[in-house]
Image: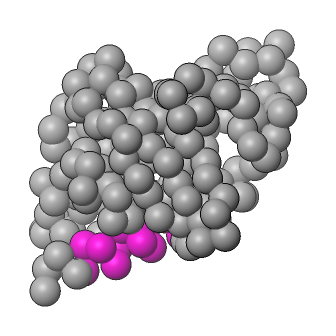
């Protein structure tokens, strides 16, 4: 196994205070309004916001496709930092392989920082797989363009949600 794994990093600025951004990432009703790819709705099965706590969710497409996932929180430093391990899961919350790749890492460690300046907030999401074999590391690295596209759509949904909150 190679020693280094290139992080996936995406940064985005929002015209909203960081306290609101942080709540959008940590409250079930707010997450349900925007989390996930374009065209999917979110069902929040569980949200226990504490170190070791679980956010267990189901993303549903209009065509009936369901994808379950989970965050296990490692660090919560409101409103400036959130650290969690993200995985695909089954309906019971057990970690499972990705529905799109047998070589996708089982766990991805994500750190999100929230930095406010003059009423706008920049979030930076940094993620990297943990405890991987070479094939999983390579699959993650090769997926960076797809991850960027997917997170762009998700963050567009967040931007629209925040704009609606300010009206």
Q: Position of residue 82 (x, y in %)?
A: 31, 36
Residue 116 visible in the shown view? no
Q: Is residue 95 left or right of residue 11?
A: right
The picture quadrant where one finds residue 113 is: top left
Q: Position of residue 8 (x, y in %)?
A: 60, 44
Query: What stretch of residues is rendered in magenta?
Result: 153-163
- Residue at the (72%, 19%) spot, across then down: 132
Front-most of residues 159 and 53: 53
Asked which quadrant contains residue 138, the reply is top right
Residue 64 in the image, given as x and y percentages of width and height: 64, 63
Extreme-bottom residue of the structure: 167
Q: Nearer the viewer, residue 105 or 29?
A: 29
Query: Is any atom of residue 142 visible in this view?
Result: yes
Q: Is residue 101 left or right of 39 when viewed as pictured?
A: right
Tell me which secondary structure the magenta stretch mostly adopts: helix
The x and y percentages for residue 69 are: 53, 39
Residue at left offset 60%, top offset 24%: 95
Q: Is residue 161 positioned above or below 76 on the image?
A: below
Q: Residue at x 52, y 54 (%)?
A: 59
Say if 79 sits above or below 110 in the image: below
As for residue 84 lying within the magenta part, the answer is no
The answer to whether residue 157 is magenta is yes
* Quarter in which the C terminus is drawn: bottom left
**Residue situated in front as seen by the camera: 66 or 157:** 66
Q: Identify the colour scheme used.
A: one colour
């Amino acid at each position: 196994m190679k020693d280094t794994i290139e992080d996936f990093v995406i940064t985005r600025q929002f015209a909203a205070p960081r306290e609101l951004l942080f709540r959008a990432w940590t409250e079930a009703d707010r997450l349900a309004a925007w989390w996930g790819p374009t065209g999917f709705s979110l069902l929040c099965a569980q949200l226990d916001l504490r170190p070791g706590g679980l956010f267990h969710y189901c993303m549903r497409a209009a065509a009936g496709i369901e994808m379950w996932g989970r965050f296990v929180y490692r660090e919560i430093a409101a409103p400036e930092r959130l650290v969690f391990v993200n995985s695909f899961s089954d309906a019971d919350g057990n970690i499972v392989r990705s529905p799109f790749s047998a070589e996708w890492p089982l766990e991805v460690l994500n750190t999100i920082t929230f930095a406010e300046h003059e009423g706008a907030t920049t979030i930076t999401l940094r993620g990297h797989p943990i405890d991987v074999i070479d094939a999983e590391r390579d699959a993650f690295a090769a997926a960076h363009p797809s991850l960027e596209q997917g997170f762009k759509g998700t963050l567009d949904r967040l931007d629209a949600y925040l704009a609606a909150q300010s009206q």
